[in-house]
Image: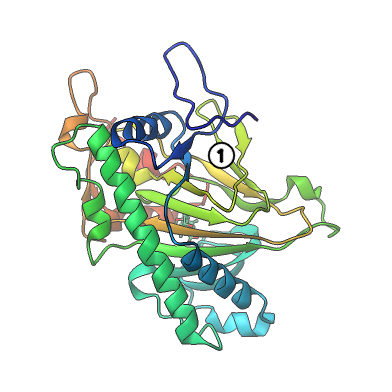
Amino acid sequence: MVVSSPSPLRTKKTRAIGIPIIDLSLDPTTLSQHMIAACQDYGFFKIVNHRVPIDVISRMEEAAHAFFSKPANEKLKAKANPPTPFGYGCRNIGFNGDTGELEYLLLEAKRSDTSSFTDHPTNFSCAVNDYIHVVKELTCGLLEMLALGLSLPDTHVFSRFIEDTDSDSCFRVNHYPSVKGQSNQLKPTHRIGFGEHSDPQIFTILRSNDVPGLQISTVDGLWIPVTTQPTEFCVFVGDALEVLTNGRFKSVRHRVMANTSTKSRTSMMYFAAPALNEWISPIPQMISPGNLRLYKSFTWNEYKKAAYSLRLGDQRIDLFKCH
Ligand code: GA4
């Protein structure tokens, strides 16, 4: 795979080959145009020069490492009973039979009370809260840049959902242990860490260590491996942003293959979501005689319910198409 820098903008005739890497130190006009091209063509891009303090990232990575290093019976204390999506999970994803070769912690961003998870609840909670704070700021900045590039009259049209104190954003830490040498009917390289899906939210900001596994699907259905450097974040367009932009930006399908490296893969995702009672519908500026309205209006609560009633890989956005 060829990775172009700063961003492989597509023209009508040519097709970009690399995953877009966007340099946040570019001037706002160029930056917003690069981001728009990436959201349209891939629904995905990587960012560099993001200015997120490295100590906040390192503290969160250390806290995650400390948690996943605990014995299984300790980690299970953080499992919700009866099951909710939140807390500790091992292999099971959602409630409808999806599984993967991972364990995880899923937390509500606004209520990240982690006192039952660790020996040092204050340290862990501080690490989580500080990390959520900086990635939330980053997310809002990126969303404002997109609104600017689309020449929308209100540059907060997307970010206001995330700024809302009732925003339903969540934070997930995934830990993919090595499956190398483990016996299974499937070859290790065919095993799945986290199955193919798109994220239901507006935007997802991911950071991982250098162990590979993440793949994104192109619009032609080709799977491209995504490698990341410690200096980068990955950004994913979610279903809600596809609807808000009336399909101009595409929510990206992605998956994680089981980890065949000797080291564990750890990734941290901030899922930026609206409040449960917020209405999601294509913004008027994205609809025109040449761009007919593609999606119905719905509340984030309705969308979330639909997501949890289906399997991970289902195309839940189709339920909300106009025709
Ligand atoms: C995918 C994105 C986030 O990880 C997540 C996931 C959620 C879960 O693991 O509980 C879902 C999945 C995700 C989409 C469909 C439903 C809900 C599992 C599942 C089968 C936390 C989210 O919001 O949606």
Q: Which residue is mark 1?
A: 216
Q: Residue furthest top?
A: 13
Q: Amino acid at mark 1?
A: Ile
Q: Position of residue 256 (x, y in %)?
A: 62, 49
Locate the N terminus and report the quarter of the image it occupies. Answer: top right
Residue at 42%, 39% in the rendered image: 251
Q: Position of residue 130 (x, y in %)?
A: 40, 70
Q: How many marks?
A: 1
Residue 272 shown left or right of residue 192 in the figure: left
- Residue 244 visible (yes or no): no
Residue at 51%, 52% in the rendered image: 311
- Residue 73 visible (yes or no): yes
In this figure, which colouring scheme has been used for the structure? Answer: rainbow
Residue 4 shown left or right of residue 291 in the figure: right
Q: Is residue 8 above or below residue 268?
A: above
Q: Quadrant of residue 323?
A: top left
How many C-alpha atoms fall within 10 Å of the one at disc 1: few (<14), some, or many (≥20)? many
Q: Residue furthest left?
A: 153
Q: Nearer the viewer, residue 267 or 102?
A: 267
Q: Position of residue 236 (x, y in %)?
A: 44, 45
Q: Is residue 294 above or below residue 216?
A: above
Q: Is residue 182 above or below residue 321?
A: below
Q: Nearer the viewer, residue 279 or 308?
A: 279
Residue at 42%, 32% in the rendered image: 38
Residue at 40%, 42% in the rendered image: 24
Q: Secondary structure at mark 1?
A: strand
* Mark 1 C-beta to ligand 1 under 8 Å: no
Q: Is residue 133 above or below residue 285?
A: below
Q: Position of residue 80 (x, y in %)?
A: 49, 78
Q: Nearer the viewer, residue 218 or 155?
A: 155
